[in-house]
Image (spheres, helix red, strand yellow):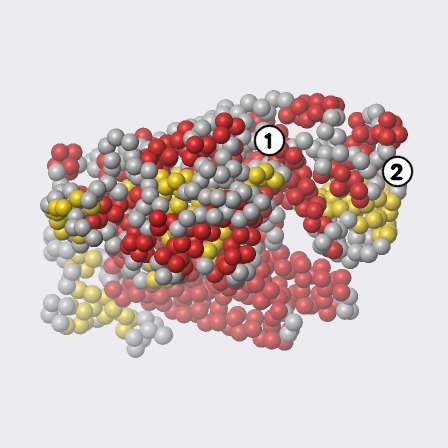
Amino acid sequence: MADTKNKNKHDGKRKRDQREDVNRKDDGVGGSKDNKQQQQQQQQQQQGTAQPLPDKFQSHREYCALWAPLLLNEMRAQLLSDSISDIPHWRNKPDQRPVRVMLQPRKKDLESTSDGLGIVVKEVVGEYKDRMFMANDIVVLVEEESILWDATKGTMNGRNNSQKQQTQSSISEAFQCGIVGHIEYTRRSIEGLVITVSRSLWTQIGSREMTLLKIGSNITSLREFTALCRMDRLPLAEYILCNKMNVSQTNDNKDISTSTSATVDNDKYNNLDPSLKEKQAKKRILESMGGASALGKGFADYARHKFNLSQLEAVSASAAEYGNGGFTLIKGPPGTGKTTTLCALLNALHIRQMNQYFGEVKVLAESYNAVVGKRATLSLSDAAKKRPRILVCAPSNAAVDNIILKIMEDGFVDGNGMRYNPSIVRIGSGQSASVKDVCLEDKVESYLSESLDVTKLENTIEGLKGECRRIHSDITKLRQRMNVMKNAAPYPLSKDWEIRIDEETADCAPRVYFVNHKDKTTTYEVPPPPEPGERHFPARAMPEYKAFVSRVVKMVERYNNITSKIDRYSLCRNAAATAAASGGSSGAHSHAINNVRIQLETYILDSVHIVMTTLGTAGNRALEAANKFEVVVIDEAAQSVEPSTLAGLQLGSSHAILVGDPQQLPATIFSMSGRDTKYDRSLFARLEEAGHAVHMLDTQYRMHPAISDFPRRIFYDGRLVDGPNVKHPEYGNPLKMSVFKKFPAFQPFTVLDLESSEERGGTSLANSAEAQLALHVFNNLKSGTNGLSTKSRVAVITPYAQQAALLRRTFSSSLGGDYERFVEVNTVDAFQGREANIVIFSCVRAAGSKGIGFLSDVRRMNVALTRAKNFLFVIARCSSIMVNPYWRDLVEHARETDAIIPVPFSGSRQSTFSFPDLSTLKAVPARGKRLINEKERLTGVENGETKQSVIELMGLKLEIPPTKRPNR
């Protein structure tokens, strides 16, 4: 199941850079730049949608009326972007080349009054007859292939002047560029392909030979539009409109320890030792989740030791709000363990749902009629419907795979503190081969492959049925024992007595006997009733009775799993029988297999506990046919537009958990009006702006404090704190000390000030000097640390696709084609969610008073500055990027910490640039009072002296008196 909207981030960035050109084109292919009528049409289409979307909506009608035009506009812009981005590559890819075809209207559509007209490909002129088209593919039809190339340039050179002069009507004008068609049904060859086009446009053309080209697919957009139209049916509809909202004091930027201490005396609480304070806060959080009674002592102990306070509070909120309805918002700034927390909340939700399921099965186990009567089979099937149902979505395949790999690596922890692997399945193939074992398609194909041997299949089914009969018989026997125990005494027994089953009579007519633990005697006589005030227990509290119930619960689970397998194998058997009855007809066999495949997908989705998928495939046929989910969890929720999130929410119940960070990059959009209308704003961001409570993970474990200092203050209002690992003096060693020793001016955060200029290519930018300096920094670090830096993870990132391409060429030319073994080069957008020990960030822009364009997005700035663990080198022209207030603050921050190093160079764009040895460079001293940098904090050295300071080493505070530094 292809996820057509989830492109890789590099392509998404390239397409975003082309938006200005793309949105000057008309629907389908393109048009004349000076076409005033066309521009007026675009303005009319967008009229009423230029206003930004509100934070809250009054009704479902208002919600759909405001969103629908924006969604359609984005759908159109994305198709245009796909077309223009891919046209230069069509001639090099035979399976994507334009095809000459003969077209003819479908006869049954000729008398219709609707605007949609089906046209049929009657003949293919030339090659590529066997090309496959999928349902919901979008194609374009033009007279000549040259029109396609001209359209990407905004011209109509493919038509002569006389033809242009004859063009007067808007319809004829549209055909000058081509008409767009929609594929209704999948077909494995072009001949016979049915394309739906506009009747009014087709009447201007008539049947003729034309060039056909696939330009994309709108299946994901259709799913989003369907979800938008169904929004009023969602259990979460009132929460989406913000008519209902969960507002708490965590939304007021209050410290989490304050919110968790509300029930105790503030003075007493504030005077506690920090470790004891945290211990008490965690205890209260776990109690709010139901404590050991709800999640088990083993999981409670695991959670108490594994997670920090903010992580535990987020898990608690997700579990506590489950069943109450509404949204739980969890904000995960860089390095705060967002994926770890997400897996933990899935673990907690799974335990809660499993406990509910086992509670239902326990009631069933104690109900005699439900287990041994006529309703036995039906009751066991009903119990299966109570199993956990959790849907996990994310915008990209990489994000989905990341969660699956984390669960596969760490597993879940049960109520006894033991590891277990939950039942999961992934829709779609994913990007990682490691997730293949849980892919839905592979599971389905495994069943279908067994249908090839009908005899073996029949034997398998009969064997499973026999096992079901044995389980049913065992359940009946256990239930009889339980019933005898419940009726053994007319009253509860004192604490000294226990009821047991006589195993010698268990298989025929179960009989009980009584054990007196105080006297160490046994008897078949019913003991006397307990004395007044004496502790007593009913039969259900007896150890043997509990053991019987536990065995029945496991047998019911086993029974349900086997019946699910029988259903699946029966489908395969029926498909094989249908194929045999067809007399070898390939068409009948293919049709039967496809039907079975759909049913198998639904059966599997209904039987597993956790389903993983991208938002783009959340509305597919199998998921819509499956049972609804108890809770929907959406990761990277701030990176998806709201209609995309709706596609996932329509599959769930009344509770959804959104995990993400609106302070990082949003979804990639293609319509120019998207930002003005707030179309690019996620549901997470809108709910937060509307006042919804947000649970923020507040401790980062990635960045050295010198790197995290600026993002903490600028992007997270000072609420993000450093974890104990990054504050430890040894964090980053031996790499850190090796770099400090060789390059005295370098700090964990360093700005390399380069007086260079950028070059424009198309709509993207590049800077040759910065690219060569990035290589120079890498080579200097490699030689200066004796190769230690190359053993660490190094990344070179930039906002611009053209600069990323230039950097790849630069590194490949110097280091060879296998340079990626030592360093990764990518765009900022593509590197979101990842980290490296050393990050070299090429800003590119040096536009002075003209502005810094793409670089000015503060969310992109946040991502770029928070990828590094030990060293972040920012290459920029400081005087130019300071036109933006955020970048000006960064430069001033660097000045205050002696982190700006001017880099002299010689050369020009046409030649190779030369740079000095970086170990010889010096930082620009700060104006006024000078701050102590990282190396001075560790060594106490400043301007030839060591100043008196207190450092912490291995938990001990050491005071260093001031001394003169000895001469070298």
Q: Determine whether 722 is above or below 475 in the image.
A: above
Q: Determine whether 421 is above or below 850 in the image.
A: below
Q: Nearest to the eye among marks 2 and 1: give it.
A: 1
Mark number displayed over residue 656? none
In depth, the one of 844 and 725 nearer the eye is 844
Q: Would residue 304 appear left or right of 950 to someone viewing this image?
A: right
| Number of residues whose C-alpha sits closer than 10 Å to that of mark 2, classed few (under 14), some (14–19) or many (20 or more) | few
SS assignment at label 2: loop
Seen at 72% across and 54% down, the residue is 92
Q: Quadrant of residue 362?
A: bottom left
SS assignment at label 1: loop
The amino acid type found where label 2 is placed reads: Gly
In depth, the one of 788 and 221 nearer the eye is 788
Q: Quadrant of residue 151?
A: top right
Residue 790 visible in the shown view:
yes
In depth, the one of 399 and 356 nearer the eye is 399
Residue where numbered disc 1 is placed: 672
| Number of residues whose C-alpha sits closer than 10 Å to that of mark 1, classed few (under 14), some (14–19) or many (20 or more) | some
Q: Would residue 627 appear left or right of 934 to someone viewing this image?
A: right
Q: Would residue 686 appear left or right of 16 to someone viewing this image?
A: left
Seen at 36% across and 39% down, the residue is 900
Residue where numbered disc 2 is placed: 206
Seen at 83% across and 49% down, the residue is 100
The amino acid type found where label 1 is placed reads: Met
Residue 219: x, y in percent? 64, 44
Q: Residue furthest bottom?
A: 504
Determine the CA span between mark 2 and mark 1: 35 Å
Q: Would residue 144 appear left or right of 852 to someone viewing this image?
A: right
Residue 915: x, y in percent? 44, 48
Is the N terminus in the top left, top right, bottom left or bottom right quadrant?
bottom right
Q: Determine whether 67 is above or below 420 in the image.
A: above
